Amino acid sequence: SPSLLWFRDDLRLADNPAFTALAEAGAPIAGLYVLDEDSPGVRPLGGAARWWLAQSLRALEAALSRRRIPLILRRGPATRVVPDVAAALGAATIAFNDRAGEAEGKVDHGVAARLAAEQRRVLRFCAHLLYPPGSVKGASGRMPRTFSAFQRAALKGRDLAPPLPVPATLSGATHPPPGDTLKDWELEPIRPDWAGGLRTTWDAGEDAALSRLSAFIADGLAGYRDGRDLPAENHVSRLSPYLRFGGISPRQARAAIRHAADAGEIPEADAEKFEAELTWREFSYHLLAEDPQIASRNIQPSFDTFPWRECPGELKAWQKGRTGYPLIDAGLRQLWQTGWMHNRVRMAVASFLTKHLLIDWREGEAWFWDTLVDADPASNPASWQWVAGSGLDAAPYFRIFNPVTQGEKFDPEGAYVRTYVPELAKLPARVIHSPWTADAATLAAAGVRLGATYPRPIVDHAAARARALRAFESTKKT
Ligand code: FAD
């Protein structure tokens, strides 16, 4: 009898332990993807992530069909849908890779229990992470509280297994039960079609992920350690949406980078820095396992009394990239146009929202959740809390990014700003991060009219900084 492979955040054929296990067992395979927007507590995907999911499923469907394996699409609570499909297929064995998160864990457990009650064999694996949640522990038995301690504990005494190849011998199930079409799910926008910038920026799917990784190793990884801070340069991998939905596994990325470093193709320091960034992802997932509410609750309870401001107008200006600070506006426009933002700028815009505007980090987290193609249930809230100061091993609250000096340091020629804030493109580099300091002739020559073609700053940096420090002091006292 056939086997059922339930795909989750692992939309690939290589290094997919559930897939390999079924292929080795030899029975014909059918794939299943369940769009589950009904199970309690499972956070529905945001708009950009839904778009990414649609592209990834299309690529997966094509890759499977080249191997004559059908992909069944179904919608509904997984605890009902997976057993239903297994019964309709007559599957003796069902394999899947677990998802992280409390609600997702309950779903996995519920599915496995129902299948077992129906006398079906269930095979479960961990494929989304290098270190299964809860496996990296400090002396206390809990996860280490600082990133560096986490990294030390993670690396200690561990040899990571090499990634699995795409299984060689495969056969597909011949009479799969009917399913939906991708179109039925309306994952992609129609009216208005806001996904044009996403389409021109990205190619989703496993093949695209592997090409991205090779291109990054060939051109970008050497120089990563320092270059990763420069948003106009080509020194980051842009693998995040693939890692999020499993077009590639962290093990594949890590192994390829290690191989390049061991072969002397790239400097060791760059490989180590990249591995450390992958470990930040693991740190976030460990945190999510310990504290499933990280997207809604302060990790540091002292922040529960923080005097956040309600100001929809300023939030809107931030979302639209109209704060009057060019680096901040460039970042938010890059996000809106392409569904992705460079890490250095993510930190700057998150700091600006939570410190300059004193707007609750949850507002920013929700905006990112809706607009990022890599919107991640662990890395997004953990990073927001890290910047806001309410997180684990967080940046100290008083470290308030100055959006002008950040721009001057990391985008010295203004190339990044010129790309995403074209109305400032003709300004000379010395004033591009602070157009209000330019004299009238310079502004006129560049065609910039402050307050008309480009906004004046919505807050004054020095005053906003002082206000943020006062707010923090007041919280400490309560
Ligand atoms: P690279 O520099 O090439 O890094 C390789 C991989 O390592 C990334 O793809 C990612 O999986 C991981 N990684 C790198 N930096 C981090 C980090 N600081 N924390 C966790 N993982 C990291 N990352 C997401 O994947 N999804 C999110 O929703 C997300 N939200 C963020 C929100 C804020 C406010 C901030 C400051 C950061 C956020 N990050 C998030 C982390 C980081 O910005 C992105 O992972 C990175 O910019 C992705 O680009 P890249 O793939 O080119 O990264």
Image (cartoon, rainbow, N blue to C red):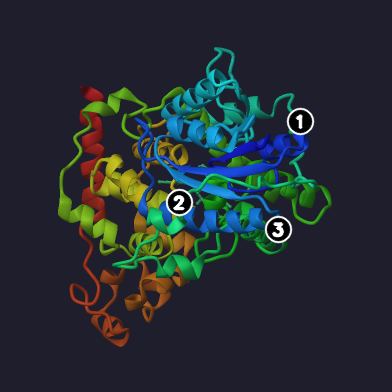
Say what amino acid the circle numbered 3 marks: Ile
Given residues 177 and 192, the one toward you in this image is 177
- Is residue 208 among what the camera can see? yes
Nearer-N-terminus badge (2/3): 2
Q: For mark 1, give the secondary structure.
A: loop
Labels 1 and 3 touching (C-beta < 8 A): no
C-alpha distance separating marks 2 and 3 = 38 Å
Residue on which disc 3 sits:
217
Reading the image, the residue beneath label 1 is 159
Question: Tag 1: Cα neighbours inside 10 Å, few (<14), some, or many (≥20)?
Answer: few
Sequence order check, earlier mark of 1 and 2: 1
Position of residue 252 measured from the top left corner of the image (x, y, whole percent): 69, 45
Q: Quadrant of the C terminus?
A: top left
Mark-to-mark CA distance, 1 and 3: 22 Å
Query: Dividing the image into 4 quarters, which one contains the N terminus?
Result: top right
Q: Is residue 409 left or right of residue 272?
A: left
Q: Determine whether, in the image, residue 455 is placed left or right of residue 213.
A: left
Above-or-below relation of 246 to 452: above
What secondary structure is found at the residue carrying circle 2? loop
- The reply to whether the residue tagged 3 has its Cβ within 8 angstroms of ligand 1 is no
Q: Amino acid at mark 2?
A: Asp
In this view of the protein, can residue 227 be seen by the observer?
no
Q: Tag 3's secondary structure?
A: helix
- Disc 1 residue type? Asp
The answer to whether marks 1 and 2 mark residues whose Cβ atoms lie closer than 8 Å is no
| Tag 2 residue | 180
Say few, some or many: other residues with alpha carbon within 10 Å of mark 3 (under 14 / 14 to 19 / 20 or more): many
Q: Position of residue 391 (x, y in %)?
A: 40, 32
